[in-house]
Image (cartoon, rainbow, N blue to C red):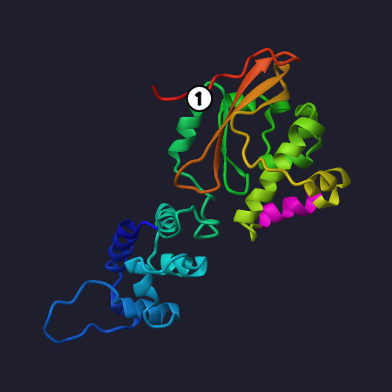
Amino acid sequence: MNKTALRALLRERRALIAPESHGFSRPSGQGRRAPGLSQHQVDQLLHRTFGTYHRLESGNYPNPPAALLRDVARLFGLNEQEWVSLNRYALLQDPPGPLHPSSGKEIPGVWQEAVDSITHMAYVTDASWELLAHNEPFEAMFPDRQVPTNTMRWMLLDHDGREQLTDWRDSWAPMVLPQLRAALVARPDDEILRGIEKEVLADPELAHLYDIDGALIHPDGHERPLRHALHGLGWVSICAAQPMTAPGSRLFILIYHPGTTRKHARAPMLRAV
């Protein structure tokens, strides 16, 4: 626990909330009144026993429950970055999922301009793997430039996807399915992801692979075979990152190398000198 940082974050955000906005009145007597809600008022609003919030803000609550952190974060109107900070300060770990179900569903519009500036195939998906932005090289990868609306569903369930993702049974499906499972752990109520999982479980081949637990939760740095609509058989090196304002969203850059066999040695790791 980082007590100093935790105290600073909670005090700052608590001070921004007017007690009157929650039906409390300010004392009319003399003396300095700290801005914002009192610690006792936070306990009242969260239906916690007296002193619970004081223990949290003062750093004297080891391993506070996730439900308490989430309730405090929502009362204080934290954004997703502050939600991550709260968990890191209080628990020394990232949160188990987003603060709000709607988080990860949109990104700043400038991302389209950023993706357009990339010469390799590039695209951005939201937390449900719905396509948010892509560039022309990515569009050219598909027959008739028919870009899928959901890349997870396309990789796993679309017939054309299985045709384009060569060696689909061994090089793609076992790598993608654990990402679906990991996404559902973070977003168990996501209707789109649940729908994809339902379709996966209805497919005997995929259901069998889904039952085989895998540890891969992102493809960053992987190389996989692929049939490009214009350039034919080849390999793609995958670079993956996340827009910081949208937890669960992803930026993918696919670097295409032609040929039926992998001829390019894996690039060395980059380290600061």
Q: Quadrant of residue 88?
A: bottom left
The x, y position of residue 96, in whole percent, is: 55, 56
Q: Residue at x 51, y 40 (%)?
A: 242
The x, y position of residue 97, in whole percent, is: 55, 56
* Magenta part of the chain: 191-200
Q: Nearer the viewer, residue 57 or 262?
A: 57
The answer to whether 249 is drawn above or below residue 191 in the figure is: above
Q: Main secondary structure of the magenta part?
A: helix
Query: Label 1: which residue?
Result: 118
Q: Nearer the viewer, residue 199 or 12?
A: 12
Q: Nearer the viewer, residue 44 or 136?
A: 44
Q: Residues within 10 Å of mark 1 (few under 14, many from 20)?
A: some
The x, y position of residue 159, in whole percent, is: 81, 36
Q: Residue at x 82, y 52 (%)?
A: 201
Q: Is residue 194 magenta?
A: yes
Q: Is residue 46 magenta?
A: no
